[in-house]
Image: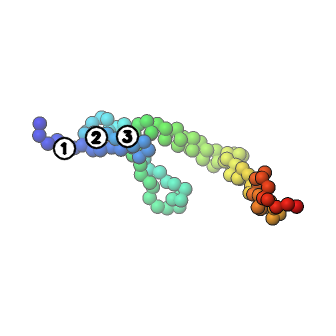
Amino acid sequence: MGKQTGYARYQCDRCSKTAFLQESSVDTRTWYAIHRYSSNQITGGEPDQYTLCSDCFSKYTQLITADDKAFADWMSNKPNVLPDLKPSGTVTEPDTEKDAETSGDSETTGKTE
């Protein structure tokens, strides 16, 4: 057999799975080209482009379905649809010089009072 042409290399941008497939093969249908806008592209720009294998595309579909539902709930002005974006704890400045030196440790700094 001589030279064969018409092959393409597919590589999943998520899991790095690779396949060399003839472009007319039905197996090319198990690879997906997706376009995604990140939050910093919402007012313009071109979407990021990714190639996903069928396993990763299935997981991506689950992720984007959940995002679609959250967005639809948010657009309908339902209460409590966004996660609490407040920090779970706050950092407080030390009140005294001794607190600053120990920085929360239970050990003493060697100073006597």
Circle 3 SS class: loop
- The reply to whether residue 112 is in sight is yes
| Relative image position of residue 100 (x, y in whole percent) | 77, 62
The alpha-carbon separation of the residues under discs 2 and 3 comes to 11 Å
Indicate the amino acid at tag 3. Answer: Lys
Q: Residue furthest right?
A: 113
The answer to which of 45 and 88 lies nearer the viewer is 88
Q: Residue at x 76, y 61 (%)?
A: 101
Indicate the amino acid at tag 1. Answer: Thr
The answer to which of 109 and 64 lies nearer the viewer is 109
- The reply to whether residue 93 is in sight is no
Q: Residue at x 79, y 59 (%)?
A: 110
Numbered badge on residue 17: 3
Residue 53 occupies which quadrant of the picture? top left
Indicate the amino acid at tag 2. Answer: Phe
Q: Residue at x 52, y 43 (%)?
A: 64
Numbered badge on residue 5: 1
| Relative image position of residue 63 (x, y in whole percent) | 53, 41
Whether residue 31 sits left or right of residue 20 in the image: it is right
87 in relation to 52, above or below: below
Pointer 2 or 1: first along the chain: 1
Query: For the N terminus, which image quadrant?
Result: top left
User: How many other residues sit within 10 Å of disc 2, few (<14), some (14-19) or many (≥20)?
Assistant: few
Numbered badge on residue 50: none
Circle 1 SS class: loop
